[in-house]
Image (cartoon, helix red, strand yellow):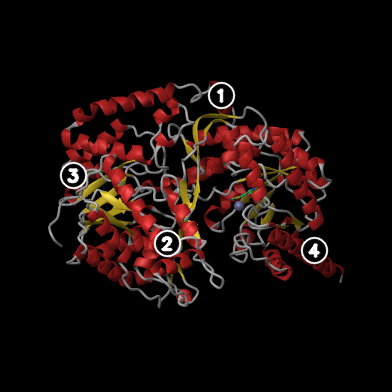
Amino acid sequence: MSAISPLSQATILGYPRIGRRRELKRAIESFWKGNTTEAELQATARELRATTRARLVELGLPTVGSAIPESFSFYDQVLDATLALGAIPGRFASVTGSDLDIYFSLARGNDQLQPLEMTKWFDTNYHYSVPEIDENTGLKANPAQLVAQVTEAREQGIESRPVIVGPVTYLLLAKASDDAGEGFAPIDRLDDVVAVYAELLGALAAAGAGWVQLDEPALVSDSLSVPRAETLALVERAYAVLGAATNRPQILLTAPYGDSSQALERLGKLPVEAVQADLVRGSLPTAALASGDLAAAFTGTQLVAGVVDGRNIWRTDLRRAFSQAEQLQTAGISTVIGTSNSLQHVPHDVADEQQLSAQLKGWLAFADQKVGQVATLARGLVEGAAAIETELADTDAALADRAQAAGVRVDGIRSRVAATGQPERDRVTEQERRDAQADLGIPQLATTTIGSFPQTTEIRKARAAFTRGEIDQAQYDGFLREEIERVIRLQEEIGLDVLVHGEAERNDMVQYFAELLDGFAVTENGWVQSYGTRATRPSILWGDVSRPAPMTVAWSAFAQSLTERPVKGMLTGPVTILAWSFVRDDQPLEDTANQVALALRDEIDDLVSAGIKIVQVDEPALRELLPLDADRQAAYLDWSVGSFRLATGGAGADVQIHTHLCYSEFGEIIDAVDGLDADVTSIEAARSRMDVVVPLGDHGYSRGIGPGVYDIHSPRVPSTEEQAELIRIAAASIPGQQLWVNPDCGLKTRGYDETIASLTNLVRAAREVREAALAGVAS
Ligand code: MET
Ligand SMILES: [Zn+2]
């Protein structure tokens, strides 16, 4: 390794890459449609990268010392690693074309090939493309994209730092391909993969990269296939090899998204030149710091103190962050200021928000503001605290303003939450509820849907026209009523047992409620990448939450007025509302969740008064917020379940409460799902061919359960026979009286043709199995 400069004292782990106005989304989608060429798309991407680097310099990151990460991605950082490793799954062998063609084929599939599966990246709402590895997966270093970025940056006068998902995390996030032998795990190929990383590092060194960043968030997770202690040992094994490579850039090894304090001393001893620790979710190993052991471990190694939160949009408490970093520096550790993780999870710039109040804006920091904070803190480390006293004092003032601002703490809301306890979270016994709900006349293997019906172009157009003021409230409401009536008639014709109103009035299942509740603000440009070219605009939950008026009652009551069959009220649960928003960081999540829960509790009350007998409270994010740290999981499950029960616990015995969870990694939280105490739970199951029903059966789950029999993630229409087969699989583990028949999730992304065909088959399948069961009894 050539002697090169140390890592700059200010850095970030990554930056949003979709573009300030989602330019990359537009460019990629236009390329997919065939409206632009690959060369044009590459030119747009180059321009975006150049703009990003220039912006980061403008915000205070130096052009030298590899402060600026190359965190651009056309789609996903794990998929980037797959391409860089040449780890193309065998089933894609037939795909030809440029690297980019292959890349997008893996991401999106084609007529013959299913795309790589997508799943959530650690405890975020970002989705990555899951690598598929087996004993024979070809591996071949393909550094072209990484090298190109280093070269581009140099031509721009900037020493940048390429970023790659590290080898251990890459393999622990991969799944064994269908061709893999019995018992094979992707991590079995660690040595092969490390050898390819060594080649990539060689190519980067040759291209003149002074530093490379290898991300190993697997280090902080207890939710992977190997225990955390073993992950650390694997990291040691991998980096012993990479560190020994003679021709490589200096290595920054990162451990974002959680607490690495237990591992930090050992990470400091690795043959790498810098290690990052998330000091927002995580903490410093205080004993090792005091004893000097941490400093000893970090001799000759820089420590990047991740003190600026990359997960949230609140202005950093600079004084607190500075004192954390100062402690390290005082202990004799060469300290760099950094972020807790990549800023890819926050929007670009508070300055792009015109509608937010000036006061709220004063409390916020999006990516650009956070970069500024990093630069300020770094200046403080170099020049002393006095040099940044103005900035520290400004932050103190903003935080003090936030603490006392109207709406942040509302006594009435707080005392109401404080007055609740277990009784508010408990309903009468299951048996009493079953008896009281018998009047609903719900048959065995009852059929229903998850809530949304297709969001058609007409619906989007009407909403846009209303937002722009081209149609008035009465016209818009009239349009929605017609839409609801159509959806009700359609469900009756198809023959579903429990109907929904279709959610046509909702742009998004969280934002809809955020707009109607007090305590939330909505952004104009606060886009955050969810996956690929998809982005969401999370709302900001800044104050105490309350419900100024009913939110869904008019729509549900109207739908119910049109039909004799029961219509489900449809709400989003407290945990999901929190998970898909930017939530205040000045009090425990539990307190915020309970406020949301009380607002929902009142909504349920009003729905019931308006004649609704079944209410579904969706909690698709229950699993997502599960802490990566095993130690913190029990407390999380306790409050998350408690808040759901507070929302639903006021419903009388005759009100049937449903919930919906859409993922299949279910095992870890099965007790919590049981703890929700919903009368009926629908879950995703079709894609995994009912994998969840066996653990549910073993668990002795006693209430209603609807494992999805129709995979709504693609336009494919599942046949009657196929769905009947899935129902029969479920019926083998779960008694028929408990079983419901429904799709995996809502239908909003689907078209009408396929929806009608699939639901028609679903209803037929349920009838077929029902009748066969009756015939079985009769004979
Ligand atoms: C991501 S879960 C979605 C549930 C919602 N009720 C819907 O059907 O769209
Ligand atoms: Zn769902």
* Cα distance in 3D space between marks 1 and 2: 44 Å
Mark before the other along the chain sequence, 1 or 2: 2
Q: Residue at x 60, y 61 (%)?
A: 692
Task: Return the residue at label 4.
Answer: 767
Residue 585 x %, y %: 43, 35
CA gap, disc 4 to disc 1?
Answer: 50 Å
Q: Amino acid at mark 1?
A: Ser
Residue nearer the viewer, 194 or 343? 343
Res 777 → quadrant: bottom right
Asked if residue 510 can be seen in this view, the reply is: yes
Give the number of the disc on residue 405.
none
- Comparing 664 with 702, the one in front is 664
Q: Which residue is mark 3?
A: 333
Q: Residues within 10 Å of mark 1 (few under 14, many from 20)?
A: few
Check the image and report above or below for 30 versus 409. below
Residue 685 in the image: state x and y as whole percent: 62, 61
Q: Residue 648 sits in which quadrant?
A: top right
Q: Is residue 295 left or right of residue 77?
A: left
Give me the C-alpha separation between circle 1 and circle 3. 47 Å
Residue drawn at x 49%, y 31% is 355
> What SS does tag 1 mark?
helix
Ranked by sequence position, the earlier of labels 1 and 3 is 3
Residue shown at the point (18%, 66%) measured from the top left: 247
The mark nearer the N terminus, 4 or 3, is: 3
Q: Which residue is mark 1?
A: 415
User: Mark 2 = which residue?
Assistant: 173
Q: Is residue 194 above or below residue 332?
A: below
Outermost residue toward the left? 3
The mark closer to the camera, 1 or 3, is: 3
Density class for disc 2 (Cα within 10 Å; few <14, some 14-19, many ≥20) is: many
Callout 3 amino acid: Ile
